[in-house]
Image: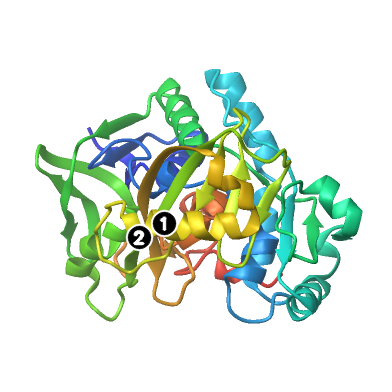
Amino acid sequence: MIDDVLVVGAGIIGLSVADALAREGMTVRVLEMDRVAGAASGAAAGMLAPLSEALVHEAGDPGTNPLVHLGLESLARFESLCHRLREETGIDPELVRSGLWRPVADGRERRAAQAGFDRIGPRAGAIEWCHGGDLEVALPGLARGIPGAFFSPLECHLRPPLLSRATAAALRTRGVEIEEGVAVLRLRTEGRRVVGVETHSGLRRAGRVVVAAGPWTTALLEPVLGADGLPRIEPVRGQILALQPPLPAVRGIVYGADVYCVPKRDGSWIVGATEERVGFDRRVTAEGVARLLDRARALFPSLASATFERAWAGLRPVEANRWPRVGATDVEDLFVAAGHGRNGVLLAPITAERLRDMLTGKRPPSRDALARDASA
């Protein structure tokens, strides 16, 4: 059997692309060397925070940062997406419209954050500044030396493992084959056209191939694209941990300059995350856990008495220019969707839409389907 599309990778990007194409009536097959959401997608905290990501982690002017526009556009898809997945599968991705608190350490940091929100403009929504007694009510237990915090009501969070499971379940109800434990050894080409992939269990043929293999994308593409046309995507380890009560009675994400705390529905907190260029090393280290705990306690000293549940790590796929590669390649019928770094979950819906539109002819082929609309 020759599928219309073969997707390599069952992280949230690959699953979302497969979902969008299957809903167009295409026959789709997904190949995953491990298990569904077994890498970065299963390790993520699930923050959907385009404004704060632009302020805290992305270089350049937040007012012109492409992540803001695309992130907000993608964020707007999540409510209907999660509703559809609940209806189709009975699995709730636990989308919570919690808002996000951005504490600042001093006046200089407050001015910088305020200037960033101002440059973003009306898209940032009704950002509020909170201090004094109001801050103590909103963020009980916050360290006394912190003068205040901004509140961003637009931003929210969910459970990426549940989102991935729900998407996979929806795919299976549409007849999509998801083959777990099947490693792709190489892409099969005829001339300058891809015709499928070779696996340890044989050849899988397809009319088109989408490589969404996270930090393993580069190794798969290099033999057919060569160094010049190759997206350079590297793994960046993110260690993360979960705490159980006793915890401060905080509602909403708390996103500091070097740590975030995400209260979940079950009463736990997710605390993350390190950024470490250590190759494909997915170990949890004592140093990484200690660093996260120290940073979290700097925000909320009472976390010293919280119950430590567990820690884990994922490998984020980070493109050399820190911008996702989504679109066509120099090889006919070969597409790529990888390199989303910290924002794979957030950008999954918009990535899937853009790639779907290219494969169905609604948009012309492009080597960067996201950048095309990034500054709109």
Asked whether, in this view, residue 97 is left or right of residue 8, the answer is right
Helix, strand or loop under label 2: helix
Q: Quadrant of the N terminus?
A: top left
Separation of disc 2 and disc 1 at Cα? Answer: 5 Å
Between 63 and 217, the one lying in front of the other is: 63
Name the amino acid type tagged 2: Glu
Between 300 and 157, the one lying in front of the other is: 300
Neighbourhood count class around disc 1 (C-alpha, 10 Å): few under 14, some 14–19, many 20 upward: few
Asked whether, in this view, residue 361 is left or right of residue 191, the answer is right
Task: Tell me where residue 296 sits by quadrant.
Answer: bottom right
Q: x, y (%) of residue 276?
A: 36, 66
Q: x, y (%) of residue 18?
A: 43, 40
Between 274 and 352, the one lying in front of the other is: 274
Q: x, y (%) of residue 246?
A: 60, 34
What residue is pinned by disc 1?
290
Residue 319 has which mark? none
Q: Which residue is pictured at 42% across the width and 65% down the height?
A: 275
What residue is pinned by disc 2?
287
Asked whether, in this view, residue 172 is left or right of residue 215, the answer is right
Q: Residue 165, relative to residue 97: is it above or below? A: above
Q: Which residue is pictured at 27% across the width and 52% down the height?
A: 283
Neighbourhood count class around disc 2 (C-alpha, 10 Å): few under 14, some 14–19, many 20 upward: few
Q: x, y (%) of residue 302?
A: 62, 47
Q: Is residue 175 visible?
A: yes
Task: Tell me where residue 256 sits by quadrant.
Answer: bottom right
Asked whether, in this view, residue 20 is left or right of residue 187, the answer is right
